[in-house]
């Protein structure tokens, strides 16, 4: 004889499994997409710093070099599919004079950028969450420019 308080649980496992799968899979998919976005941004930032260093080193003077470095960063970010990614380019050089384009100068280009995490504002309605990225590339100017001997 069956107890009156026993419940029939037939068919509830499928519903429980479905809810459990949704609760676990949706955040997992978001994490995977976010990791891929950050990796893409990191690769683009690294490539942009390398291209900016080369563009600066190959320029005839410092002013042209800075303009070319900024343009190279924007072009590389666009080529890598990170068109909305904003970047700040900082160029420093260790030079014997105030000219970064002499044979013993060392140019260092730093690109600071960030990647917005996908779907974050829609879920939490707190604004865009971003992941900060930066890359540095150092170029000895003698690698690209042959220095003429100085007259004594």
Image (cartoon, rainbow, N blue to C red):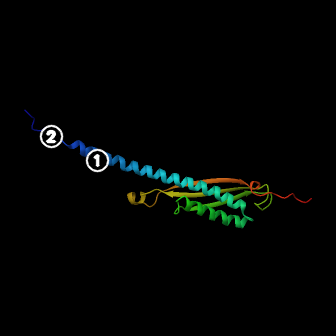
Residue 72 is tagged as none
- Residue 47, given in percent of the width and then of the height, sits at 60, 55
Where on the picture, by quarter, is residue 1? top left
Labelled pair 2, 1 in contact (Cβ < 8 Å): no
Residue that extends furthest to the top in the rendered view of this protein: 1
Residue sitting nearer the eye, 78 or 25: 78
Q: Is 46 rendered above or below residue 16?
A: below
Q: Mark 1 points at which residue?
A: 19
Q: Under tag 1, what secondary structure?
A: helix
Left or right of residue 45: residue 23: left
Where on the picture, by quarter, is residue 69? bottom right
- Residue 138, given in percent of the width and then of the height, sits at 69, 53
Residue sitting nearer the eye, 27 or 125: 27
Real-space Cα separation, disc 2 to disc 1, in angstroms = 20 Å
Residue sitting nearer the eye, 113 or 37: 37
Residue that extends furthest to the right in the rendered view of this protein: 152
Point 63% across, 65% down: residue: 71
Where on the picture, by quarter, is residue 142? bottom right
Category of crowding for the residue at label 1, using alpha-carbon neighbours closer than 10 angstroms: few (below 14), some (14–19), many (at least 20)? few
Point 26% across, 44% down: residue: 16
- Residue 122, given in percent of the width and then of the height, sits at 39, 60
Of pointers 2 and 1, the one earlier in the residue sequence: 2
Residue 8 is tagged as 2
Q: Under tag 2, what secondary structure?
A: loop
Left or right of residue 13: residue 107: right
Category of crowding for the residue at label 2, using alpha-carbon neighbours closer than 10 angstroms: few (below 14), some (14–19), many (at least 20)? few
- Residue 42, given in percent of the width and then of the height, sits at 55, 53
Left or right of residue 7: residue 105: right
């Amino acid at each position: 004889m069956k107890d009156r308080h026993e419940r029939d649980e037939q068919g509830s496992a499928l519903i429980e499994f479905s809810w459990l799968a949704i609760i676990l899979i949706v955040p997992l998919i978001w994490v995977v997409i976010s990791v891929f976005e950050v990796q893409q941004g990191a690769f683009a930032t690294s490539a942009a710093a390398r291209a900016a260093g080369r563009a600066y080193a190959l320029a005839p003077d410092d002013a042209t070099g800075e303009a070319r470095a900024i343009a190279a960063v924007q072009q590389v970010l666009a080529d890598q599919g990170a068109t909305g990614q904003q970047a700040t380019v900082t160029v420093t050089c260790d030079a014997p004079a105030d000219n970064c384009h002499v044979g013993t100068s060392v140019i260092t280009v730093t690109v600071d950028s960030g990647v917005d995490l996908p779907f974050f504002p829609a879920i939490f309605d707190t604004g865009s969450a971003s992941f900060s990225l930066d890359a540095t590339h150092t170029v000895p100017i003698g690698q690209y420019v042959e220095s003429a001997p100085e007259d004594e």
